[in-house]
Amino acid sequence: MKVRITEYLDIDLSTEQWCCNRCGRALVSARENYKHGCLVRERPMEEVHPAVVTGSEFSFRFDPDLCRLLEFCCPGCGVLIENEYLPPGHPITHDIELDIDALQRRHAGERDGG
């Protein structure tokens, strides 16, 4: 049984895997950080935040020496699952940690009519 967690992430409770909601590909154990099962791309700040006025240096761009943008994509279909701005050298955040055992008990009760 799959349970929707975010717009692009499901948890398959029978296999305890994070899955892409779009293509169904299993990413990594649901007891781990789902980002470890994704393709990771660091985007150049000037590509994501171009100058506001053509020919001007003014933009809303973060200093690339102080901030980086990481994108986490499904290795199956390429959908962008998440992105995050981090200081260089900062570890990838673990933003979703669920009680898998409690989810399994809850959904087993729903299947059994409880």
Image (cartoon, rainbow, N blue to C red):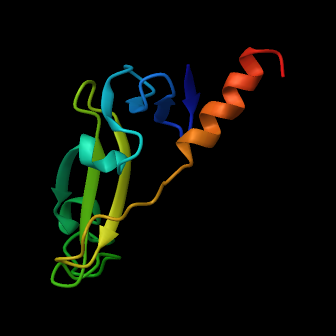
Q: In which quadrant of the rendered image does the C terminus lie? A: top right
Whether 106 is drawn above or below 54: the answer is above
Whole-percent x, y for residue 11 in the image: 49, 32
Whole-percent x, y for residue 83 in the image: 35, 55
Whole-percent x, y for residue 43 in the image: 19, 58
Residue drawn 29% across and 81% down? Answer: 58
Q: Residue furthest top?
A: 112
Whether 113 is drawn above or below 91: the answer is above
Whether residue 38 is visible, yes or no, is no
Q: Quadrant of residue 69?
A: bottom left
Residue drawn 76% across and 15% down? Answer: 112
Whole-percent x, y for residue 21 in the image: 45, 27
Whether 63 is drawn above or below 68: the answer is below
Residue drawn 76% across and 22% down? Answer: 110
Closer to the camera in the image, 6 or 63: 6
Closer to the camera in the image, 83 or 36: 36
Q: In which quadrant of the rendered image does the N terminus lie? A: top right
Q: Is residue 103 left or right of residue 69?
A: right
Q: Is residue 72 left or right of residue 39?
A: right
Whether 47 is drawn above or below 106: the answer is below
Whether residue 45 is visible, yes or no, is yes
Number of numbered labels in the structure image: 0
